[in-house]
Image (cartoon, rainbow, N blue to C red):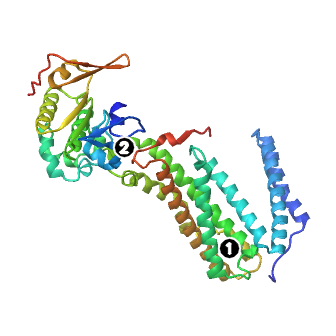
Amino acid sequence: MLLRAIADLDPNQGLVSLEGRDRSTIPGPEWRRLVGYMPAEPGWWAETVGEHFGDWTAAAAVVTNLGLPEEAKSWPIARLSTGERLRLALVRALIMQPKVLLLDEPTAALDAASVAAVESLIAIRIRAGLAVLWVTHDADQAGRIARRRLVVEAGSVREEVGQWPATLP
Amino acid sequence: MASYIALSYWDLALASVLVLIDAVLSVLFGLQIHRSLLVAAIRMAVQLTVIGLVLTALFSLVSPLWTGLAVLAMILLAGQEVMQRQDRRLSGLWSFGLGTGCMMMSSVLVTAFALLTAIRPSPWYDPRYAIPLLGMILGNCMTGIALGLNTLTTSLMLRRASVEAQLMLGATRWDAAAPVTRDALRSALMPTINSMSATGLVSLPGMMTGQILSGVPPVEAVKYQILVMFLIAGGTGFGAVAAVLGGVYRLTDARHRLRLDRLGTAQAM
């Protein structure tokens, strides 16, 4: 719900700004290109994978990084596994070149190798200047990737500070 | 009007025996529908008699005021019907207002177009032409708008994730809703297209057969029917486009968010 609110997909109150620009001064579509959001269950609107990407050649490089073949372009959406959907949705969000990326359990259905691939890909993007807000239930994963940890517990949010050096892979 | 054969009330009474036979069959087979069958038959007879009297009065008055009021009543009833046919209604005044407004706009526009160009009665609002013409256009427009809006709201609910996926990637509300909009418009226009292609082969349209029964040469009756079909297609098209786009407008907002909270709860059907 928090990520949907930040992406401005539901009516919400509060002040959200990006690089000093108040969100209300930026039109909705432009805001969502700056602040990408990948939900836990990404949606698809066409039949094959390729139709969801404006520029497949740009996508293909990232797709192969995440352990999927380039031929994935012609795969029908209906036959993708949950893990394939998550990885393809991540690529779809990344190639929009957002400044901020909101991720909701992006590795929930992935095997260990894919989890590592996703984590290292995001780490590279973070070093290149991307800000990421990553929701996870996996405390170890939070330990691996986070610079700041916000813990939502019993209806309140607290920040955990301490021994999480940004040991990015 | 030379070969027009007037019916006596005895003729009707004789034909009503057929309905009574239906009722007897219902009793014999234990269908439990004889009561509703008889009530429906009586309602039909009473309603049509009243309409006959109202039309007689309207036709003798030829008053723009009374014709206008009759037109308004027809449109409001059709708006009520569109609202009844929605699985999920828009909230607030939109549930009645959107369908009714679009039907009013398109059916009045198309009827006026026909009266001022093709048929040209004098005066142009002569209820003998205006009322039946509007009735036929309105009836079809109503079906189209009801189907279009219902398809729009149900597919937005079902395909919410796919519409929002496009919004998340920076699509505008119109782009994100385009696949659903297309489906809704297609289903709105499908009955009109089907009836145009089946007409004359499978069914003889009621207006045309009516004219033939009252002595109009078939070729002339056919010309009228073709005109009416074109008017229906135009009226349904305008009305459905306006209603579906209005629905998309209402179910999204200026921040390009999908606003399914503006739909009411599911109607018990």
- Residue B49 in the image: state x and y as whole percent: 84, 61
**Residue B60, image quadrant:** bottom right
Secondary structure under the numbered disc 2 in the rendered image: helix
Q: How crowded is mark 2: few (under 14 residues within 10 Å), some or many (20 or more)?
A: many
Q: Mark 1 lies on which chain?
A: B
Residue B8, image quadrant: bottom right
Residue B106 location (% of width, % of height): 58, 66
Q: Which residue is denoted by mark 1 in the rendering?
A: B208
Pick the residue in front: B222 or A135.
A135
**Spatial separation of the CA atoms under disc 2 and disc 1:** 48 Å
Which quadrant does the C terminus of chain A fall into?
A: top left
Q: Which amino acid does label 2 sit on?
A: Glu
Q: Classify mark 1: residues with Cα within 10 Å, few (<14), some (14-19) or many (20+).
A: many
Residue type for callout 1: Met
Is residue A103 something that shows in the picture? yes
Q: In this view, does A43 lie to the left or right of A101?
A: right
Q: Mark 2 points at which residue?
A: B164
Relative placement, left or right, of B15 versus B229 is right
Q: Position of residue A32 (x, y in %)?
A: 30, 44
Q: Which quadrant holds residue A139?
A: top left
- Would residue A46 be seen by someone viewing this image from the given angle? no
Identify the residue at horizontal 80%, vertical 44% (top origin).
B34
Which residue shows up at 75% across the image and 64% down it? B70
Label 2 vs label 1, nearer the camera: 2
Against B180, residue A65 (above or below) is above
Among numbered discs 2 and 1, the one appearing first in the sequence? 2
Q: Residue at x 81, y 78 (%)?
A: B4
- Which chain hosts label 2? B
The percent coordinates of residue B72 (x first, y second) are 71, 62
For this view, does A4 lie left or right of residue B130? left
Quarter of the image with the N terminus of chain A in it: top left
